Image: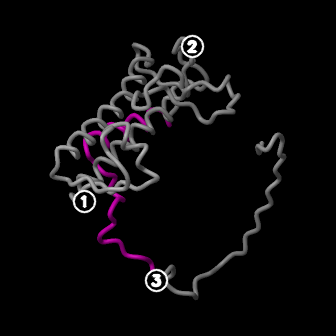
């Protein structure tokens, strides 16, 4: 986006070609970006082995640590690690701040907000919007969902045998393509 730094948060919509309600940003998609970033930080911290930067991830990390070069490891005990982690947390906080800015005084979260004025619109009091707020707050606090890790998970014997009942499923997909894109 012109005039916006790569490491500056922006309101997030569903996808580039979205025309539903004029393709406005959604509360839940904006918070989902923040949650993903917080969860990455929590994972790196929990592993305590640092961050492996690959050719693919290098541009992402470069926006937080411009001096980084090539595939490398950022040691968890290094100043660079602290810089990257703090910068990513601040980046994530920016997405939450956008949602806070466009949340009405009554705290109601609709489906989306207008890209021009930030006025809420579409589905009023969308449960998914509230759920995304709860999960992002937990992610920021470093709280993982109970299902993460599943250390003592036991699998039903019906699932762990080839004798389990099976059902054949057929999917029929109809796609119209125009200008090289699928609709």
Residue 171 included in the magenta stretch of the image? no
Q: Earlier in the sequence, mark 2 or mark 1?
A: 1
The residue positioned 72% from the left and 75% from the top of the image is: 168
Q: Quadrant of residue 178?
A: top right
Q: Earlier in the sequence, mark 2 or mark 3?
A: 2
Instruction: Find residue 47 and name its label.
Output: 1
Q: Residues within 10 Å of mark 2 (few under 14, many from 20)?
A: few
Mark 1 vs mark 3: in front: 1
Q: If the image is split into quadrants, where does the N terminus sit?
A: top right
Instruction: Find residue 138 and name its label.
Output: none
Give left or right: position of 125 versus 149.
right
The residue positioned 28% from the left and 49% from the top of the image is: 42
Callouts 2 and 3 close, C-beta under 8 Å: no
Tag 3 residue? 157
Q: Secondary structure at mark 3?
A: loop
The residue positioned 33% from the left and 30% from the top of the image is: 93
Q: Residues within 10 Å of mark 3 (few under 14, many from 20)?
A: few
Q: Earlier in the sequence, mark 1 or mark 3?
A: 1
| 105 and 183: which is toward the camera | 183
Residue 60 at x, y = what percent? 41, 43
| 129 and 140: which is toward the camera | 140
Identify the magenta region: 128-156
Image position of 14 with respect to 116: above or below: below
Give left or right: position of 20 versus 97.
right
Instruction: Find residue 116 and name its label.
Output: 2
């Amino acid at each position: 986006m012109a005039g916006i730094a790569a490491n500056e948060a922006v309101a997030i919509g569903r996808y580039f070609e979205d025309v539903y309600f004029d393709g406005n940003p959604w509360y839940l998609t904006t918070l989902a970006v923040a949650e993903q970033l917080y969860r990455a930080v929590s994972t790196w911290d929990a592993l305590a082995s640092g961050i492996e930067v690959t050719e693919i991830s290098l541009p992402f990390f470069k926006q937080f640590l411009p001096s980084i070069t090539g595939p490398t490891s950022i040691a968890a005990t290094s100043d660079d690690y602290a810089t990257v982690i703090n910068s990513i947390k601040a980046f994530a906080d920016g997405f939450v701040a956008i949602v806070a800015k466009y949340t009405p005084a009554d705290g109601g979260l609709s489906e989306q907000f207008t890209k021009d004025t930030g006025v809420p619109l579409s589905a009023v009091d969308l449960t998914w919007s509230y759920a995304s707020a709860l999960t992002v707050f937990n992610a920021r606090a470093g709280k993982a969902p109970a299902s993460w890790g599943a250390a003592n998970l036991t699998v039903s014997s019906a699932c762990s045998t080839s004798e389990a009942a099976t059902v054949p499923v057929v999917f029929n997909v109809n796609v119209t393509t125009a200008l090289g894109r699928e609709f």
